[in-house]
Amino acid sequence: MGAPSSPSLVDLTVRLPEDVSDLIDRAARVSDVSPAEFMITAATLAAQEALADQANIVVNPEAFEAIVKVLEDPPIGEAYHRLMTAPRPWKT
């Protein structure tokens, strides 16, 4: 077995307005990382979020019909109200 191969790296040059560069520098300092590491992490998270929003969910016809039924005639009651008003984990 050989040593694991390292990922290939790509150079990327970005021109930023000075105020944006200053903001990134400040955020990197308080995060105790370099500005490059901060931007890589932030860009990776933003890319993952953008792609997650594009996910397709495939269900069988019976499940699809059940989903449509709930959407057309939502349940009522306290439990449903709590579910619909609960904090969204992706909004925290």
Image (spheres, rainbow, N blue to C red):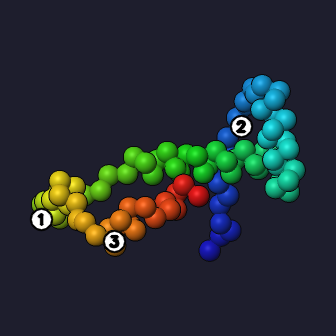
Q: Which residue is mark 2?
A: 11
Q: Which residue is mark 3?
A: 78
Q: Residue furthest front?
A: 78
Q: Is residue 65 above or below residue 2?
A: above
* Mark 3 or mark 2, whichever is nearer to me: 3
* Quarter of the image where one finds residue 62: bottom left
Report the amino acid beneath label 2. Answer: Asp
* Distance between the alpha carbons at the discs numbered 3 and 1: 27 Å
Q: Is residue 91 visible?
A: yes
Instruction: Return the disc, 3 or 1, that comes first in the chain's sequence.
Output: 1
Instruction: Out of 49 and 12, give the one closest to the viewer.
Output: 49
Is disc 1 surrounded by few (<14), some (14 to 19) or many (20+) residues within 10 Å? few
Report the amino acid beneath label 3. Answer: Glu
Q: Is residue 59 visible?
A: no
Judging from the image, what secondary structure is the residue with disc 1 in?
A: helix
Instruction: Return the disc, 1 or 2, that comes first in the chain's sequence.
Output: 2
Is disc 2 surrounded by few (<14), some (14 to 19) or many (20+) residues within 10 Å? few
* Distance between the alpha carbons at the discs numbered 3 and 2: 54 Å
Name the quarter where the C terminus is drawn: bottom right
- The residue shown at (46%, 64%) is 86
Q: Which mark is residue 62?
A: 1
Q: Decide: marks 1, 2 in contact (CB < 8 A)?
A: no
Q: Is residue 14 above or below residue 67?
A: above
**Percent x, y for residue 91?**
54, 55
* Distance between the alpha carbons at the discs numbered 1 and 2: 49 Å
**Percent x, y for residue 71?**
22, 55
- The residue shown at (76%, 27%) is 16
Instruction: Return the disc, 3 or 2, that comes first in the chain's sequence.
Output: 2
